[in-house]
Amino acid sequence: MGIDGFTLVAQIANFLLLLFLLRLFLFRPVKRVMQARERRIAEEHEAAERALADAEERAAELAAEREAFARERHERLAAVAREVEEVREKRLDEVAAEAEAAREAWREDMRRQTDDLTAALRRETAEVLGDALRSGWRELADEDLEARALTTFAQRLRALDDVTRVALAEAAELGPLRIATAFEPSEAQRAELLQALNDVLGNGGEVEVDFVRDPELLAGVTLRAGDRRVGWSVRQQVDALQRAWAEGSAGGGAATAEAP
């Protein structure tokens, strides 16, 4: 079989034409598409790498933020713990102070109650003691004791200081003097008292005196001249002792001159 040259040339021309047409209408678009796809893939790869880098950077930032947050949380917890401890210590101090104040108030109340009880007991004891002494003296007091008391009173009148003497003299000018005795004095005892008054006042026997009986004195005598009072009596001694005992002070010795 022979080869037709024309057919061969035509086949070659057709093949070349087909290649040209394929290149023109198929290979070039496909190549452009593939190149565009490669560029898109490259761009997407670069974008993915950038996104990955951004993600890694963001992850690092988040890790740093978490670390900073953890440090801040730890510091805040430590600060809160310190504040709680300070508040606890302060409250403990306040509670201790309140407890001490309560104990001191209780002790003060106990001292006050003890003092009140002691004072009440002293008053009751003093009252019982005073009643017992007064009752006993009522049994013991008699005219003989009264006579000795009047004699002692006359002696004490003569021993008065100048200030008391002047005060009695001034009071005597305003009205009669008043002498109270537990028992009725005899004429001799009255004369002795008048003589002692004249010696003290120095008025030559012109002193005016009212004698009264006061059984509440138990034994003894008192002289009242105006707002002045001088004297000694068992009742006065017992009352002074009762007051001293009730007040918790030392015994109460009698004074020879006292305010009204």
Image (spheres, helix red, strand yellow):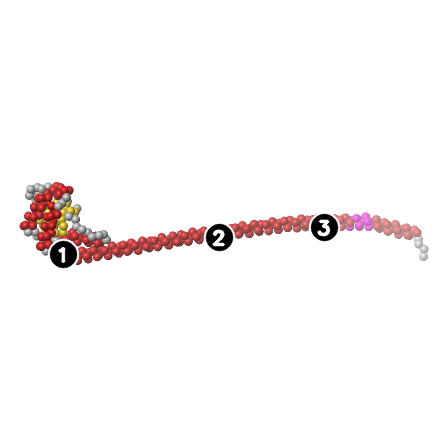
Q: Quadrant of residue 96?
A: bottom left
Answer yes or no: do the residues labelled 2 and 1 have beta carbons within 8 Å? Answer: no
Q: Mostly what secondary structure, the magenta segment? A: helix
Which residues are drawn in magenta?
A: 21-30
Q: Amino acid at mark 1?
A: Trp
Q: Amino acid at mark 3?
A: Ile
Tell me the residue that label 1 is attached to: 137
Callout count = 3
What is the CA distance from the residue labelled 3 to the residue labelled 1? 137 Å
Q: Nearer the viewer, mark 3 or mark 1?
A: 1
Query: In the image, which disc is placed on residue 41?
Result: 3
- In percent of the image, x 72 and y 50: which residue is there? 41
* Image height of 132 relative to 31, above or below: below
Q: Is 80 in the magenta?
A: no
What is the CA distance from the residue labelled 2 to the residue labelled 3? 57 Å
What is the CA distance from the residue labelled 2 to the residue labelled 1? 81 Å
Q: Residues within 10 Å of mark 3 (few under 14, many from 20)?
A: few
Q: Is residue 171 visible?
A: no
Quadrant placement of the N terminus: bottom right
Q: Secondary structure at mark 3?
A: helix
Q: Nearer the viewer, mark 2 or mark 1?
A: 1
Q: Secondary structure at mark 1?
A: helix
Tell me the residue that label 2 is attached to: 81
Q: Secondary structure at mark 2?
A: helix
> Relative to the observer, which residue lies in front, 174 or 157?
157
Residue 109 rendering spot, x and y as whole percentages: 31, 54
Q: Residues within 10 Å of mark 1 (few under 14, many from 20)?
A: some
Q: Residues within 10 Å of mark 2 (few under 14, many from 20)?
A: few
Q: Amino acid at mark 2?
A: Ala
Q: Is residue 40 left or right of residue 203?
A: right
Residue 62 rendering spot, x and y as whole percentages: 60, 50
Answer yes or no: do the residues labelled 2 and 3 have beta carbons within 8 Å? Answer: no
